[in-house]
Image: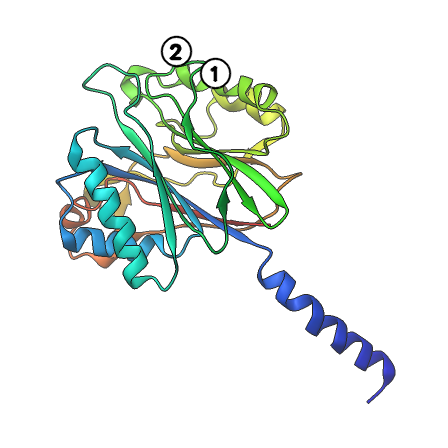
Amino acid sequence: MPRLFKTTLVFLLWITPLMLFSQVKIMTWNLKNVGSSKSEENISYIAKIIKQADVVAIQEVVTNPSGAQTILALHEELNRKSGSKWEYALSDPTLSSPYRSERYAYLWKSKHLKLKTKAFLEPTYQEEIEREPYMATFQYKDFQFTLVSLHALPKKHQPEKEIKYLKFFPTQYENKNLIFLGDFNTPESNSVFNPLKKQGYTPAFTNQKTSLRQKCINGDCLASEYDNVFLQQTLFKVKSAKAILFFEDFESIKEANKISDHIPLLIEIE
């Protein structure tokens, strides 16, 4: 065997495991009224989708006890059937008007990620942002990153008026390696995201509709481009960005809507 080939083979055998384990899979999913509306069958299905990720940010957890109970049930289902050990964090109710207040949640594989500090609802703009973002810093090997999960106001209530405050976060949380994700109820092409883009934050998805229609039209079951992930591609290389069309697993869009009226988004970064 030529020496050059031997050297190359040894190098590849050495580096391949590093490459295989140098990526993190991040999911965001507005799960639509996470609480008593989710049956055991729903929870089992949701867990099958979520287990593809290393960490998932969930929006729209109801504030009554059934919200916390359902997240706990999902956590237990993942630990039973996914083949990995999971941990979770659940926010307090957001400081919103009662009919808009919600909780957020994170679930993550503890083998891959460590939560560095307690996740928290960001307090600075709680008067300006109806459902203040839920932030969590994770460590992967020697690198840390911070997820900023947001469920913005519905489109008819001008979510732009609160999204605009996100532009201050990179300065306020300097060196935290922020990743903004969630349901913005706004397409990434909206000019409200320009200040973030000028700071180097780019969307992982473009022209990707994420909300479900009530009825499919000529096979088109998606309505609006609402959910996304914004990150600095000078810090993170996006290996893949996948919209998970879970509704295709169901006989009708009505049945799919019992899981959620949004599809999950999954990115793989390194």
Q: Amino acid at mark 1?
A: Tyr
The answer to whether residue 218 shows anywhere in this view is no
Residue at the spot x=64%, y=47% of the render?
142
Q: Is residue 194 left or right of residue 212?
A: right
Kindly check if marks 1 and 2 are in contact, taking CB atoms under 8 A apart as contact: yes
Task: Identify the residue position indicated by label 2 in the image.
Answer: 128
Q: Look at 58% across and 63% down and name the residue there.
A: 20
In the rendered structure, find residue 262 and report the number of the disc placed on it. none
Q: Which residue is mark 1?
A: 165
Which quadrant of the figure has residue 23? bottom right
Q: Is residue 81 placed above or below 206 in the rendered structure?
A: below
Q: Amino acid at mark 2?
A: Glu
Element class at badge 2: loop
Residue 112 in percent (x, y) is at: 50, 54
Viewer can see residue 141: yes
For residue 142, above or below residue 44: above
Instruction: Tell me the residue at 28%/30% (across/down).
Output: 103
In this view, the residue farthest toward the top is: 127
